[in-house]
Each structure stands twice: as C-alpha cells, then as structure tokens.
Image: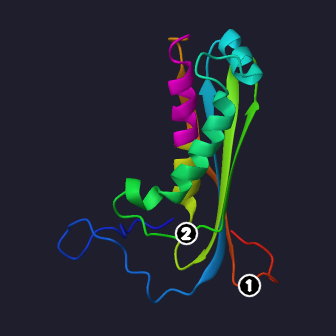
Amino acid sequence: MTNELTHINQHGQAAMVDVSSKPVVHRRAVAEGFFVAQPETLDRLVEGALPKGEAIAVARLAGVQAAKCTDQLIPLCHSLPLEHATVEIERAGNERLRIQASAVVTARTGIEMEALTAVSVAALTLWDMTKAIDDSLRIEGIRLVSKEKRASDQEAWSN
C-alpha cells in the first residue's frame, strides 16, 4: 500500500489525478455492504409487500444508475465509460440483506468507486423504502471485495 496521496497537487490542494499516460486496461471491481433491519421488515422487503412497492428491484436499479453517475457525485472521480454494472441483493441472515455490486470498464483508471457507490446507493434506497415501517435500520460493512485488471480479453484476471 502506498502512503502517497494522489489527489493532492504540489501545493497541497485537492486535484484530479492525471491518468493520461497510464495504459488502457480492462478492469473489474466488486463491492459489498449489508442492510440491517427487523426480520419482519426484511420479510416484507423480500415479498415486495411494502407501502412503496418492490424495494429490492428499485434498489438494484438505483445502484446501477449510481455506478453510471459516480463522477457526478464524487468530485475527483474520472468519468468512465462503464461497460457493465450489476447489483445483487440477497438475504444473508434473519436481519440482514447482502448487497453486492460489480462494475467493469476498459480505461486508464480503476472502477472501485463505481462499485462502492452502487452498493451505497442501493442500501440508501432500501432505507428510504423501509424507513416508514422500521426505525432500527442500519447500513454496515460497505467495502471493496476485489479489484482486478487485465491487459486484454485473452489474459487472466489479476489483482
């Protein structure tokens, strides 16, 4: 791990990193997080029986949309030609849903922020759609699970 801050210029000011000299590489990132609620809330979520409708479907779409708009939400993120994004939501226990997002791009910089943003916005969407029936909601453990890259489609993925 490097200790050098890449988003700080020679004057100590925040600045976008210049990636123009980096090679174009095929990249994939996976992130996850957990939405925690009362078991009854999750039962209703999974059944699609909420006052605001099918929250899981809406959260999946919100996550994909967020991945596509990451550069508009986080000031120093590069605009990336997102090639693929997925958001999967599944029950991970009596009081937990696991949200996993993946993003793929062929570009000069990584796609981690897009995967993390997708998980975050999907979780926030679930919160918004269940807050009227549960005041114990939590979002936990949002993290980068993996990031991989390869120079061409014929190469194996590497960390």
Residue 21, relative to residue 10: is it above or below? Answer: below
Circle 1 is placed at which residue position? Answer: 152
Which quarter of the figure has residue 140?
Answer: top right
Question: What's the residue type where badge 2 is placed?
Answer: Gly
Q: Is residue 110 above or below residue 151?
A: above
Which disc number belongs to residue 110? Answer: 2
Residue 48 visible: yes
Q: Looking at the picture, how far across and down is residue 130, in whole percent?
A: 56, 19
Q: Are marks 2 and 1 in contact (CB under 8 Å)?
A: no
Closer to the chain start, of discs 2 and 1, is 2
Prevailing secondary structure of the magenta residues: helix
The residues colored magenta run 121-133
Give the CA separation, mark 2 to mark 1: 15 Å
Whole-percent x and y of residue 148? Answer: 68, 68
Is 157 placed left or right of 111 in the picture?
Answer: right
How dense is the environment of label 1, judged by Cα within 10 Å: few (below 14), some, or many (20 and up)? Answer: few
Q: Is residue 39 left or right of residue 35?
A: right
> How far across and down, in percent of the image, does residue 92 sit?
75, 28
Q: Is residue 93 left or right of residue 107?
A: right
Q: Is residue 127 magenta?
A: yes
Residue 46 percent coordinates (x, y): 75, 23
Is residue 143 in view from this perspective? Answer: no
| Residue in view at x 51 percent, y 13 percent | 132
Q: Is residue 69 above or below residue 60?
A: below
Q: Residue at x 35, y 66 (%)?
A: 5
Q: Amino acid at mark 1?
A: Ser
The kind of secondary structure element at disc 1 is loop
